[in-house]
Structures are given as structure tokens and as C-alpha cells.
Amino acid sequence: MTEYEGWRLPDALVERARLWRAGEGGPAPVPRVSATVVLLRPAEGGGFEAYVLRRAASMAFASGMYAFPGGGVDPVDGDPDLRWVGPSAGDWMHRLDRPPGEAQAVVCAAAREVFEEAGVLLAGSGTGALVADVTGDDWESDRQRLVRHELPFAEMLTRRGLVLRGDLLGAWARWVTPEFETRRFDTYFFVAALPEGQRTRDVSGEADHTMWVRPGEAVARYEAGKIAMLPPTVVMLGELAVYQDVAGVLAAAAARDAATPVTPRAEVAPDGTVRLHVP
């Protein structure tokens, strides 16, 4: 592992960074637009916890690392028939610096992915309403069909008389994978409170372990070398750790710059040491 200001990079990433700087890495792949959601809940004794999952060793990207539920934006996420309440696609356009249709797709992907990977549904029958329990067999059947791309998210909500609660998502940041990576993502990070009556479920086939953890504790574990995380996850948790409760995080999200991308850059010293610079 290579360290830089607390970052630890897997050896495979270090070697790819060296090849890239030497001009042997080939053209940088175009980043895939994606969305991820940091679920939050009050913690016993005060404060709050965030939900993280450890990506299975079989995963091609960030295997063995803790991350938040999320994934790539699918074409069906931009379905114009998607019903939702909260900020309009035009409002999200300004928040995310995307055309309205693309902005809607990002928000839809965030809600869809957190349902697919954590079993949490940010939807209800209308403004102020929330689904309280999505653990039944019929819900699980729909979730699995979503994962297999057999059921569009918009169709599932419409059939159940639900609308996406876009107002429950707070845009927090945008990170783009470094150029030297073979798999690159243009990822929007959102925060959301765990809906009352719902609970996370370890249903993601991409993870081998999940946990609720206080943000500051997660960072401390990372710094002690007890868990592995990529820079965006560490930074996100570190930023959240300064807030006292979930309400404070959600209020702060409204003033965050979630449009300007943060792209870490690899610096290779003459001795071959790789340092990751985060602007």
C-alpha cells in the first residue's frame, strides 16, 4: 500500500498510476455517470451513524473496500413517465450541472440503487408520505427484478401507486475517478435519512459485509489500517463527522457544491513513490 496524507492505495492501483504517468496506460476511459447514497440514522446515545458495505473480493472495482450503496445510471432511469415529488428536474439541473433529463436520471439512479443494494425505498404515495415496510416477499421479488434489469424503477413505483421522494435526497458532492483507473465513474454523492419504519437489509450481491458506523469512528478505523476505503468515502465520512445529528447534515446539503467535480491526480516521484493529490 502507498500512503499520502492518510490515503492508502492498493498495490494494483499504484502500479496502474505508474504506468499511466510513464505514458503506458493507454487512453483514459470515459467516466460512467453514477450515483451513491449515504444513508443516515440516529445513534444510541446521540449523534448518528452512516451505512456502509464492503465490496466483495470478486468485484472488479474497489474489491474489499467499504463504500456506500450506489451504481451506474441506466438508460431507463431517465424515463419521462417517472412520477416524483420534491425539487423538479430543472432544480436538479442546477444542483448537479446536468441537463434536466440527465439530472432526473441521476436522482432516479440514486433512489433505485439504494433500494437494490440496501432494501431501502425513498418513495411514498405523495408529498410527506413514505412507505414504511418494504421487506415482504412481493417487494423482494420486485427488487430482484430491478437488479436483473427486468423491471424499470418508474414502472414499479407506478404499479404500486407510489412516487419517488426526491426531496429526501440531499446532493453533497461529485467525484470523478482518476484518469489512470481502468474503470472510471463520474459519481454524485447524496445523503438521506433512513425512512421511519424501514431498515437496511444485507441484500447486495456485490457486498460481503455491511455495518452502521459513526462517521468519525469509520475514519479512525481507516487511519488505523483496520478497514479499506477509497478517498471519496474517507472524505465524505470526515465531512459528515463534524455534524451533531442527521438534521444538521440534511440542512447542510442544501448549501453544498454538488456540481463541481473533484478528480484526484496521481503524482509519481523520481523514486517511484505514488502520491494521490486531491484538489
Image: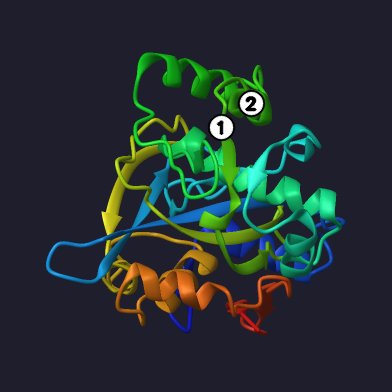
Quadrant for the N terminus in the image: bottom left
Q: Secondary structure at mark 2?
A: helix
Is residue 57 among the parts visible in the rendering? no
Q: Is residue 89 left or right of residue 166?
A: right
Q: Which mark is residue 158?
A: 2
Circle 1 packing at 10 Å, graded few (<14), some (14-19), many (20+), is many
Task: Residue at the far left: name it.
Answer: 45
Residue drawn 46% across the image and 43% down it? 129
| 140 over 53 or under it: above or below | above
Residue 120 at least partly seen: yes
Examine the image and state in which quarter residue 189 appears: bottom right
Q: Quadrant of residue 80?
A: top right
Q: Between residues 221 and 41, which one lies in front from this camera angle?
A: 41
| Numbered tag placed on residue 262 in the rendering | none
Colour mapping used in the image = rainbow
Residue 2 in the image: above or below residue 63: below
Q: x%, y% of residue 179?
A: 76, 64
The one of 28 and 200 positioned closer to us in this rendering: 200
Determine whether the residue tagged by mark 1 lies in a helix, strand or loop. loop
Residue 234 horizontal/vertical position (percent): 45, 70
Number of numbered discs:
2
Question: In whole angstroms, how far apart are the C-alphas of marks 2 and 1?
Answer: 6 Å
Percent position of residue 190, x then y: 55, 60
What type is the residue that disc 1 sits on? Leu
Q: Residue at x 66, y 77 (%)?
A: 257
Q: Residues within 10 Å of mark 2 (few under 14, many from 20)?
A: some
Q: Quadrant of the C terminus?
A: bottom right
Q: Residue sitting at 42 percent across and 36 percent down? A: 131
Point 72% across, 72% down: residue: 261
| Residue beneath disc 1 | 162
